[in-house]
Structure formats: structure tokens, C-alpha cells
Image: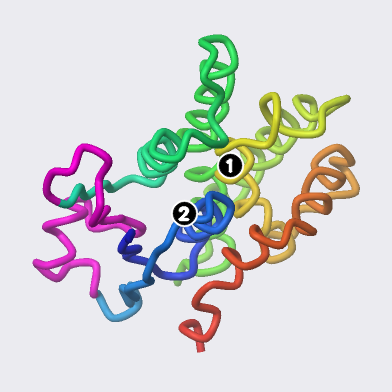
Amino acid sequence: MIDLLYWPTPNGWKIAIALEEMELAYRMIPVDIGKGAQFEPAFLAVSPNNRIPAIVDQDPDDGGPPVSVFESGAILVYLAEKTGRFLPADPRGRSETLQWLMWQMGGLGPMLGQHGHFKLYARDRIPYAIERYRAEAERLYGVLDRRLAGREFVAGPYSIADMACWPWVVTHKAQEIDLAVFPNVRRWYDALKERPALRRGYQLGRELRG
């Protein structure tokens, strides 16, 4: 059993999607980030960076005590290695998938997060910040669009790289990014949206948002 310490955000959705796609038994433990639950000692013991998601694997493969993992990219790799799914075993395929996973972790997620913050949530409207992160968001969408030209998925077969990127593209409407400008991203996004397991993961905890 996997304990999923979770709140419905793009980074949380990544892991919910992976757990559903990998058909792993899990229980969702809400961490209300709006009320500061991510700063509670019990959560910090699992995720010292006070960010969701995190997991605790109650049944690790080595038969030892429970294993806790924080950082969504590390969780995706852990789950893929645990199940032998969605991360190629051959060195070339593995490297390609991990490169695009790291691209999402270091670029797509943080930059869209900053764009969303300054555009939608910041108390003070700062045109420079909005324009800077808007330009970077569009640049990254362009990178993804070029990558998906002639490809069904981000890296080889459907993988944890797709599971990492898709939840951030979900935010395109709120961030007013027109997917018509990025037709390959649009095709990929719409195709993945039809996957039943992905939809279940994306919908996990919708009621928590109120």
C-alpha cells in the first residue's frame, strides 16, 4: 500500500495519475496547503521541503521498513522502478525519458507556476514579472510542441515524462495560453485526456478544492 500525501495541484496530479496508471494500491491522505498543513511536523518528516506530494511505501520491495519519497520527479522514478512500467529499461530509452522528466521538473513546472502566480494570484500586479514569465511559458510550450511533432508521446512510448508534463498543460486555460498556437501539444493533450487511468488520477480529490 502506498500512502499518498496529496492536494489536487499539478504536482499532486502527476502522482495520482501514475498510481492509477501503474495500478498500485494507495490511500490518499489530504494535506491542506491552504491551511498550512504542509508545515506540520508529521508532514515535514516525510517531505522536508514542505511541498506536496510525497509518498510512503508501506510495502517496499526489499521487505524493510516503509520508504518515504518526496519531490514529484523522484516519486515518479521510484514508482516506475517499483512496477517496471513507464520507464524504459534500455539505457537510451531510459535516458531520453529522464531528460524530459527533468525538463519538466526544472522548466515547464516552475515557469508555469511563476506565470500563474504573477498573473492570477499576486496581490500586486507587476507587469515585468507577468511579461517575463509569460514569454518563458510560451517558449517552453514551443519546445514541447516541436518535440511532439511526429511523435505520439514525449519520449518513446507513454511514460512518466508524459505523466509529469500533462498536468501542467491542464492549466493552459487559466493562464490564457492558446493551444491552437501549439497544435502538437493540443493533439497530445487531447489524446492523453481520454486515458481512463489518467482521468481518474486527475479527478482525485476534486472535492477538496471546494
> Magenta span covers which residues?
37-65
Q: Nearer the viewer, residue 21 or 167?
A: 21
Provide residue 191's location: percent of width, then percent of height: 82, 50
In this image, 127 relative to 58: left or right?
right
Q: Main secondary structure of the magenta part?
A: loop
Provide residue 90's location: percent of width, then percent of height: 54, 13
Name which residue lies at 13% across and 44% down: 64
Residue with the mark numbered 2:
15
Circle 1: element type: helix
Q: Is residue 55 magenta?
A: yes
Q: Is residue 32 magenta?
A: no
Residue with the mark numbered 1:
132
Name which residue lies at 52% across and 16% down: 95
Q: Amino acid at mark 2?
A: Ile
Circle 2: element type: helix
Name which residue lies at 25% across and 75% down: 36
